[in-house]
Amino acid sequence: MTLEPDLRDDLLAAVPSLRAFAISLSGHVDRADDLVQDTLLRALSNLHRFERGTNLNAWLFTILRNLFHSQYRKRRREVEDPDGSYASRLTVQPEQGARLDFEDFRTALSTLPHDQREALLLIGASGFSYEEAAVICGCAVGTIKSRVNRARSRLSSILKVDATEAIGSDPVIRAALHTAR
């Protein structure tokens, strides 16, 4: 790509001001130099969008500012970890345990009487209040509470758990087995 000599001179003349602006934005000379370089590359690749006769410096400063903010947003989500110590501390719960827990839960849930399973799913999994579940099932609130309690007790017995902490991280299972204190 060949540039007109006047345009090339204007771009080169803008570099010191761009660099000073980039340093003031980033606070780091190395980042500022990279930012100026990226600005010039972007300007050259989009030179066809620049309207001749308008303010070249304003256009360049706008590009630099936009690049800085884009990099800032990206950098905000990143963690500097040059020695890998942060990455070595990251852990992820294995998925297979939760899947196995859920399958055991589904199997145990299918053994419950229909009215208990329905009440438990309305309260524990769907998030309805006892009053709302009573209206849905067409029975008294006390009946719903009793069905949920019996269902939770039976599931705890089938799954051989004494506390919801013994079950994996699946929120549906935790909600269904959660006992009122």
Image (cartoon, helix red, strand yellow):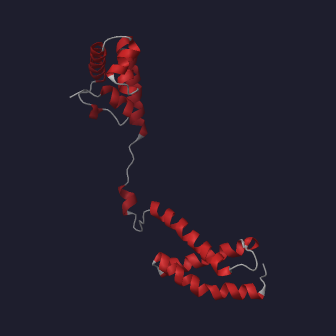
Q: Looking at the image, which residue is at 37% across and 60% down?
A: 86
Q: Position of residue 96 (x, y in %)?
A: 42, 36
Please say whether residue 108 is visible from this viewpoint.
no
Q: Looking at the image, which residue is at 39% across and 34% down?
A: 98
- Quadrant location of residue 175? top left
Please say whether residue 33 is visible from this viewpoint.
yes
Q: Is residue 100 above or below residue 37?
A: above
Q: Looking at the image, which residue is at 34% across and 14% down?
A: 116
Q: Is residue 106 left or right of residue 69?
A: left
Pick the front one: 66 or 135? 135
Q: Position of residue 19 (x, y in %)?
A: 55, 83
Q: Looking at the image, which residue is at 37% across and 34% down?
A: 171
- For the view shown, which residue lies furthest in the front direction? 54
Q: Is residue 14 left or right of residue 85?
A: right
Q: Position of residue 39 (x, y in %)?
A: 62, 75
Q: Position of residue 92 (x, y in %)?
A: 39, 47
Quarter of the image with the C terminus in it:
top left
